[in-house]
Protein backbone atom coordinates (compact mmCIF):
# COMPACT_ATOMS: atom_id res chain seq x y z
CA UNK A 1 0.00 0.00 0.00
CA UNK A 2 1.04 3.57 -0.66
CA UNK A 3 2.77 5.11 2.38
CA UNK A 4 -0.13 7.58 2.64
CA UNK A 5 -3.02 6.29 0.52
CA UNK A 6 -5.70 8.71 -0.62
CA UNK A 7 -8.91 8.33 1.37
CA UNK A 8 -12.20 9.35 -0.22
CA UNK A 9 -14.76 10.53 2.32
CA UNK A 10 -18.31 10.34 0.95
CA UNK A 11 -20.85 12.68 2.56
CA UNK A 12 -24.45 12.38 1.32
CA UNK A 13 -26.36 15.56 2.18
CA UNK A 14 -30.10 16.17 2.20
CA UNK A 15 -31.70 19.12 4.04
CA UNK A 16 -29.01 19.33 6.71
CA UNK A 17 -28.56 23.10 6.96
CA UNK A 18 -28.31 22.81 10.76
CA UNK A 19 -25.56 20.18 10.72
CA UNK A 20 -23.50 20.25 7.52
CA UNK A 21 -21.03 22.88 8.72
CA UNK A 22 -20.15 20.98 11.89
CA UNK A 23 -19.80 17.79 9.85
CA UNK A 24 -17.46 19.22 7.21
CA UNK A 25 -15.45 21.24 9.71
CA UNK A 26 -14.75 18.07 11.73
CA UNK A 27 -13.42 16.38 8.59
CA UNK A 28 -11.29 19.28 7.39
CA UNK A 29 -9.19 19.27 10.58
CA UNK A 30 -8.20 15.60 10.28
CA UNK A 31 -4.66 14.85 11.44
CA UNK A 32 -4.28 12.49 8.46
CA UNK A 33 -3.80 14.79 5.49
CA UNK A 34 -4.20 12.76 2.30
CA UNK A 35 -7.97 12.75 1.80
CA UNK A 36 -10.69 14.13 -0.43
CA UNK A 37 -14.25 14.96 0.58
CA UNK A 38 -17.01 14.14 -1.88
CA UNK A 39 -20.30 15.79 -0.92
CA UNK A 40 -23.40 14.58 -2.76
CA UNK A 41 -26.15 17.16 -2.39
CA UNK A 42 -29.15 14.91 -2.86
CA UNK A 43 -31.75 17.43 -4.00
CA UNK A 44 -31.83 19.51 -0.80
CA UNK A 45 -34.64 22.07 -0.62
CA UNK A 46 -33.37 24.06 2.38
CA UNK A 47 -30.16 26.14 2.65
CA UNK A 48 -27.82 23.14 2.41
CA UNK A 49 -26.60 23.98 -1.11
CA UNK A 50 -25.95 27.62 -0.14
CA UNK A 51 -23.89 26.49 2.84
CA UNK A 52 -21.96 24.02 0.70
CA UNK A 53 -21.02 26.83 -1.67
CA UNK A 54 -18.93 28.31 1.14
CA UNK A 55 -16.60 25.31 0.86
CA UNK A 56 -16.09 25.40 -2.93
CA UNK A 57 -12.70 27.10 -2.59
CA UNK A 58 -11.34 24.27 -0.45
CA UNK A 59 -9.22 22.06 -2.76
CA UNK A 60 -10.01 18.95 -0.72
CA UNK A 61 -13.78 19.25 -1.21
CA UNK A 62 -15.74 18.31 -4.33
CA UNK A 63 -19.44 19.08 -4.34
CA UNK A 64 -21.96 17.42 -6.66
CA UNK A 65 -25.70 18.01 -6.83
CA UNK A 66 -28.30 15.55 -8.07
CA UNK A 67 -32.05 15.04 -7.97
CA UNK A 68 -33.23 13.51 -4.73
CA UNK A 69 -32.70 9.77 -4.92
CA UNK A 70 -32.19 8.85 -1.29
CA UNK A 71 -29.20 7.87 0.83
CA UNK A 72 -28.30 4.78 -1.20
CA UNK A 73 -28.26 6.66 -4.50
CA UNK A 74 -26.02 9.35 -2.98
CA UNK A 75 -23.58 6.80 -1.56
CA UNK A 76 -23.43 4.92 -4.86
CA UNK A 77 -22.71 8.14 -6.75
CA UNK A 78 -19.98 8.99 -4.26
CA UNK A 79 -18.34 5.62 -4.84
CA UNK A 80 -18.32 6.25 -8.60
CA UNK A 81 -16.63 9.61 -8.09
CA UNK A 82 -14.10 8.46 -5.48
CA UNK A 83 -10.43 8.58 -6.44
CA UNK A 84 -9.11 7.06 -3.24
CA UNK A 85 -7.77 3.59 -2.61
CA UNK A 86 -9.74 3.67 0.64
CA UNK A 87 -13.27 5.04 1.21
CA UNK A 88 -15.52 5.86 4.13
CA UNK A 89 -19.03 7.23 4.59
CA UNK A 90 -19.93 10.03 6.98
CA UNK A 91 -23.56 11.06 7.36
CA UNK A 92 -23.98 14.81 7.01
CA UNK A 93 -25.63 15.31 10.40
CA UNK A 94 -22.79 13.49 12.19
CA UNK A 95 -19.16 14.39 12.91
CA UNK A 96 -15.84 12.66 13.56
CA UNK A 97 -12.93 13.10 15.94
CA UNK A 98 -9.84 14.80 14.52
CA UNK A 99 -7.83 11.53 14.51
CA UNK A 100 -10.63 9.51 12.90
CA UNK A 101 -8.77 8.79 9.65
CA UNK A 102 -5.34 8.54 11.25
CA UNK A 103 -6.39 5.72 13.58
CA UNK A 104 -8.58 3.90 11.07
CA UNK A 105 -5.80 3.71 8.48
CA UNK A 106 -3.10 2.28 10.79
CA UNK A 107 -4.18 -1.41 10.51
CA UNK A 108 -3.88 -1.19 6.71
CA UNK A 109 -0.16 -0.38 7.14
CA UNK A 110 0.39 -3.05 9.77
CA UNK A 111 -1.22 -5.91 7.82
CA UNK A 112 -1.68 -5.99 4.04
CA UNK A 113 -4.53 -8.46 4.50
CA UNK A 114 -6.76 -5.91 6.25
CA UNK A 115 -9.56 -4.71 3.97
CA UNK A 116 -11.85 -2.96 6.49
CA UNK A 117 -11.35 -1.19 9.79
CA UNK A 118 -14.19 -0.58 12.26
CA UNK A 119 -14.15 1.89 15.16
CA UNK A 120 -16.29 2.55 18.20
CA UNK A 121 -18.66 5.49 18.22
CA UNK A 122 -20.51 7.95 20.40
CA UNK A 123 -24.28 8.17 20.25
CA UNK A 124 -24.93 11.81 21.11
CA UNK A 125 -28.31 12.98 22.39
CA UNK A 126 -29.30 16.49 23.38
CA UNK A 127 -28.39 15.99 27.04
CA UNK A 128 -26.40 12.77 27.12
CA UNK A 129 -23.87 10.60 25.31
CA UNK A 130 -23.67 6.82 25.01
CA UNK A 131 -20.20 5.45 24.29
CA UNK A 132 -20.04 2.32 22.13
CA UNK A 133 -16.56 0.93 22.81
CA UNK A 134 -15.45 -2.05 20.75
CA UNK A 135 -13.03 -4.84 21.56
CA UNK A 136 -9.75 -4.26 19.71
CA UNK A 137 -9.20 -7.33 17.56
CA UNK A 138 -8.50 -8.57 14.07
CA UNK A 139 -10.65 -11.34 12.60
CA UNK A 140 -11.32 -12.86 9.21
CA UNK A 141 -13.99 -11.50 6.93
CA UNK A 142 -15.80 -14.84 7.25
CA UNK A 143 -15.92 -14.60 11.05
CA UNK A 144 -17.10 -10.98 10.87
CA UNK A 145 -19.82 -11.98 8.40
CA UNK A 146 -21.00 -14.73 10.74
CA UNK A 147 -21.11 -12.27 13.65
CA UNK A 148 -23.01 -9.71 11.58
CA UNK A 149 -25.62 -12.21 10.42
CA UNK A 150 -26.26 -13.91 13.75
CA UNK A 151 -25.58 -11.20 16.34
CA UNK A 152 -26.51 -8.20 14.17
CA UNK A 153 -24.83 -5.63 16.41
CA UNK A 154 -25.20 -2.08 15.12
CA UNK A 155 -21.44 -1.45 15.02
CA UNK A 156 -21.09 -4.21 12.41
CA UNK A 157 -24.19 -3.46 10.32
CA UNK A 158 -23.79 0.32 9.97
CA UNK A 159 -22.11 1.75 6.86
CA UNK A 160 -20.35 4.53 8.75
CA UNK A 161 -17.70 4.00 11.50
CA UNK A 162 -15.69 2.04 8.91
CA UNK A 163 -12.84 2.50 6.44
CA UNK A 164 -13.05 0.23 3.40
CA UNK A 165 -10.74 -0.79 0.61
CA UNK A 166 -12.68 0.64 -2.35
CA UNK A 167 -12.00 -2.44 -4.47
CA UNK A 168 -14.45 -4.39 -2.28
CA UNK A 169 -17.24 -2.35 -3.85
CA UNK A 170 -15.87 -2.03 -7.37
CA UNK A 171 -14.47 -5.55 -7.88
CA UNK A 172 -17.61 -7.26 -6.58
CA UNK A 173 -20.09 -4.71 -7.99
CA UNK A 174 -21.60 -3.99 -4.58
CA UNK A 175 -24.03 -1.06 -4.38
CA UNK A 176 -26.49 0.18 -1.78
CA UNK A 177 -30.09 -0.71 -2.75
CA UNK A 178 -31.90 2.43 -3.93
CA UNK A 179 -35.31 3.09 -2.42
CA UNK A 180 -34.75 0.64 0.43
CA UNK A 181 -34.95 1.53 4.13
CA UNK A 182 -32.24 0.13 6.44
CA UNK A 183 -30.01 -0.17 3.38
CA UNK A 184 -26.96 -0.96 5.54
CA UNK A 185 -28.51 -4.29 6.60
CA UNK A 186 -28.70 -5.38 2.97
CA UNK A 187 -25.18 -4.32 2.00
CA UNK A 188 -22.56 -4.54 4.75
CA UNK A 189 -22.57 -8.36 4.99
CA UNK A 190 -21.58 -8.53 1.30
CA UNK A 191 -18.56 -6.29 1.83
CA UNK A 192 -17.56 -8.20 4.96
CA UNK A 193 -17.81 -11.51 3.12
CA UNK A 194 -15.28 -10.43 0.48
CA UNK A 195 -12.84 -8.93 2.99
CA UNK A 196 -9.79 -10.97 3.89
CA UNK A 197 -9.43 -9.45 7.38
CA UNK A 198 -11.30 -6.86 9.42
CA UNK A 199 -9.64 -4.87 12.21
CA UNK A 200 -11.67 -3.45 15.10
CA UNK A 201 -10.51 -0.38 17.02
CA UNK A 202 -11.88 0.33 20.49
CA UNK A 203 -11.73 4.14 20.25
CA UNK A 204 -15.03 6.01 19.76
CA UNK A 205 -13.95 8.07 16.75
CA UNK A 206 -17.34 8.65 15.09
CA UNK A 207 -20.05 10.87 16.62
CA UNK A 208 -23.57 9.76 15.74
CA UNK A 209 -25.80 12.77 16.31
CA UNK A 210 -29.29 11.78 17.41
CA UNK A 211 -31.40 14.75 16.34
CA UNK A 212 -34.73 15.62 17.95
CA UNK A 213 -36.63 14.90 14.73
CA UNK A 214 -34.91 11.53 14.40
CA UNK A 215 -35.73 10.56 17.98
CA UNK A 216 -39.36 11.56 17.46
CA UNK A 217 -39.49 9.64 14.18
CA UNK A 218 -38.02 6.52 15.81
CA UNK A 219 -40.54 6.32 18.63
CA UNK A 220 -42.54 3.14 18.67
CA UNK A 221 -45.09 2.57 15.96
CA UNK A 222 -46.39 -0.74 14.74
CA UNK A 223 -45.71 0.19 11.12
CA UNK A 224 -42.08 1.09 11.81
CA UNK A 225 -41.51 -2.02 13.92
CA UNK A 226 -42.99 -4.21 11.21
CA UNK A 227 -40.77 -2.65 8.54
CA UNK A 228 -37.68 -3.20 10.68
CA UNK A 229 -38.58 -6.85 11.20
CA UNK A 230 -39.29 -7.30 7.49
CA UNK A 231 -35.85 -5.89 6.62
CA UNK A 232 -34.19 -8.39 8.98
CA UNK A 233 -36.08 -11.20 7.26
CA UNK A 234 -35.18 -9.79 3.83
CA UNK A 235 -31.50 -9.54 4.79
CA UNK A 236 -31.40 -13.17 5.93
CA UNK A 237 -33.12 -14.40 2.74
CA UNK A 238 -30.89 -12.34 0.45
CA UNK A 239 -27.77 -13.33 2.41
CA UNK A 240 -28.69 -16.98 2.01
CA UNK A 241 -28.87 -16.49 -1.74
CA UNK A 242 -25.67 -14.41 -1.89
CA UNK A 243 -23.72 -16.92 0.24
CA UNK A 244 -25.23 -19.98 -1.44
CA UNK A 245 -21.86 -21.52 -2.29
CA UNK A 246 -20.31 -20.75 1.09
CA UNK A 247 -20.48 -22.40 4.51
CA UNK A 248 -21.89 -19.09 5.69
CA UNK A 249 -25.16 -20.02 3.98
CA UNK A 250 -25.88 -21.89 7.21
CA UNK A 251 -25.25 -18.73 9.23
CA UNK A 252 -27.79 -16.96 7.01
CA UNK A 253 -30.27 -19.75 7.80
CA UNK A 254 -29.81 -19.04 11.52
CA UNK A 255 -30.31 -15.34 10.83
CA UNK A 256 -33.58 -16.23 9.10
CA UNK A 257 -34.70 -18.31 12.07
CA UNK A 258 -33.89 -15.43 14.41
CA UNK A 259 -35.90 -13.05 12.23
CA UNK A 260 -38.87 -15.41 12.51
CA UNK A 261 -38.45 -15.60 16.28
CA UNK A 262 -38.37 -11.80 16.36
CA UNK A 263 -41.75 -11.70 14.63
CA UNK A 264 -43.13 -14.18 17.17
CA UNK A 265 -41.70 -12.14 20.05
CA UNK A 266 -43.25 -8.92 18.82
CA UNK A 267 -46.60 -10.55 18.10
CA UNK A 268 -46.73 -11.98 21.63
CA UNK A 269 -45.85 -8.62 23.18
CA UNK A 270 -48.47 -6.97 20.92
CA UNK A 271 -45.94 -4.63 19.30
CA UNK A 272 -47.25 -5.87 15.98
CA UNK A 273 -50.62 -7.37 15.12
CA UNK A 274 -51.15 -10.78 16.69
CA UNK A 275 -52.09 -12.23 13.28
CA UNK A 276 -48.37 -12.39 12.44
CA UNK A 277 -47.90 -15.04 15.12
CA UNK A 278 -49.56 -17.85 13.16
CA UNK A 279 -47.88 -16.84 9.90
CA UNK A 280 -44.38 -16.87 11.38
CA UNK A 281 -44.98 -19.90 13.54
CA UNK A 282 -45.68 -21.82 10.32
CA UNK A 283 -42.55 -20.37 8.68
CA UNK A 284 -40.45 -21.26 11.73
CA UNK A 285 -41.71 -24.83 11.83
CA UNK A 286 -41.03 -25.31 8.14
CA UNK A 287 -37.46 -24.00 8.37
CA UNK A 288 -36.68 -25.68 11.69
CA UNK A 289 -36.98 -29.20 10.32
CA UNK A 290 -33.80 -28.73 8.26
CA UNK A 291 -31.75 -26.87 10.84
CA UNK A 292 -31.10 -29.23 13.75
CA UNK A 293 -27.60 -30.08 12.50
CA UNK A 294 -26.73 -26.48 11.64
CA UNK A 295 -23.31 -25.86 13.32
CA UNK A 296 -24.13 -22.16 13.84
CA UNK A 297 -27.05 -22.89 16.20
CA UNK A 298 -26.46 -22.16 19.87
CA UNK A 299 -27.44 -24.87 22.36
CA UNK A 300 -30.32 -22.75 23.60
CA UNK A 301 -31.64 -22.06 20.11
CA UNK A 302 -31.41 -25.76 19.22
CA UNK A 303 -33.38 -26.58 22.37
CA UNK A 304 -36.12 -24.09 21.45
CA UNK A 305 -36.35 -25.57 17.97
CA UNK A 306 -37.11 -28.95 19.50
CA UNK A 307 -40.14 -27.37 21.15
CA UNK A 308 -41.44 -25.69 18.02
CA UNK A 309 -44.07 -28.39 17.38
CA UNK A 310 -45.53 -28.19 20.89
CA UNK A 311 -49.27 -27.44 21.18
CA UNK A 312 -50.05 -23.81 20.40
CA UNK A 313 -50.97 -22.80 23.97
CA UNK A 314 -47.82 -24.31 25.49
CA UNK A 315 -45.70 -22.83 22.72
CA UNK A 316 -47.16 -19.39 23.37
CA UNK A 317 -46.04 -19.57 27.01
CA UNK A 318 -42.58 -20.79 25.97
CA UNK A 319 -42.13 -17.85 23.63
CA UNK A 320 -43.18 -15.42 26.33
CA UNK A 321 -40.25 -16.71 28.41
CA UNK A 322 -37.90 -16.64 25.42
CA UNK A 323 -38.83 -13.01 24.81
CA UNK A 324 -37.50 -12.16 28.26
CA UNK A 325 -34.42 -14.39 28.22
CA UNK A 326 -33.15 -14.23 24.65
CA UNK A 327 -31.69 -16.95 22.43
CA UNK A 328 -27.95 -16.93 23.07
Image: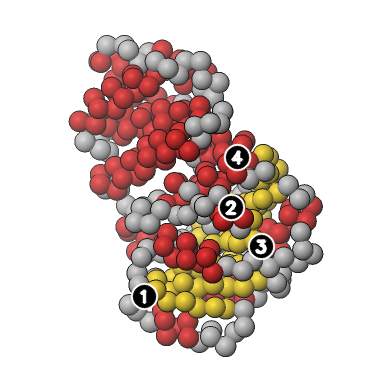
The residue sitting at 36% across, 53% down in the picture is: 180
User: Badge 2, how many Cα within 10 Å: few under 14, some, many 20+?
Assistant: few
Give the residue at mark 1: 44
Which label sits in the foreground, 2 or 3?
Answer: 2
Q: Give the mark nearest the N terminus, 2 or 1.
A: 1
Above or below, 102 against 303 in this view is: below
Task: State which tag comes first along the sequence, 2 or 4.
Answer: 4
Give the total of numbered labels. Answer: 4
In this view, the residue in front, 135 or 147, is 147
* Alpha carbon distance from label 2 to label 1: 31 Å
Q: CA distance from mark 2 to mark 3?
A: 13 Å
| Element type where label 1 sits in the image | loop
Of the residues under marks 2 and 3, which one precedes in the sequence? 3
Cα distance in 3D space between marks 3 and 4 = 22 Å
The residues tagged by marks 3 and 1 sit, at their Cα atoms, a distance apart of 29 Å
Which corner quadrant of the image does residue 278 belong to?
top left
Q: Earlier in the sequence, mark 3 or mark 4?
A: 3
CA neighbours of label 4 inside 10 A, class few (<14), some (14 to 19), many (20+)? some
| Residue that carries the numbered disc 2 in the rendered image | 171
User: Residue 127 at x, y = what percent?
Assistant: 46, 62
Q: Which residue is mark 4?
A: 144
Mark 2 and 1 residues: CB-CB less than 8 Å, in contact? no
Name the one closer to the observer, 35 or 133.
Answer: 35
Residue at point 63%, 41% (across, down): 141
Residue of label 3: 85
Mark 1, other Cα within 10 Å: few <14 / some 14–19 / many ≥20 = some
Amino acid sequence: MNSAPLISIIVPAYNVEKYIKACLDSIIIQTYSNFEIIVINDGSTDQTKKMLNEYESNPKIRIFSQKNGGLSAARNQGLKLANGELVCFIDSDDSVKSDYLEKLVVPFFEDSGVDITVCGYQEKFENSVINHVLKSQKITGAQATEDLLIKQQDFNVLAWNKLYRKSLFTDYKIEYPVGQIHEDNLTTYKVFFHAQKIAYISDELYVYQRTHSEITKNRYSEEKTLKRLQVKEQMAIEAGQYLQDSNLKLAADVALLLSYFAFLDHAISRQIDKSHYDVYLMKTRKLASSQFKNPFLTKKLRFYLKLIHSPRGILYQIFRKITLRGYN
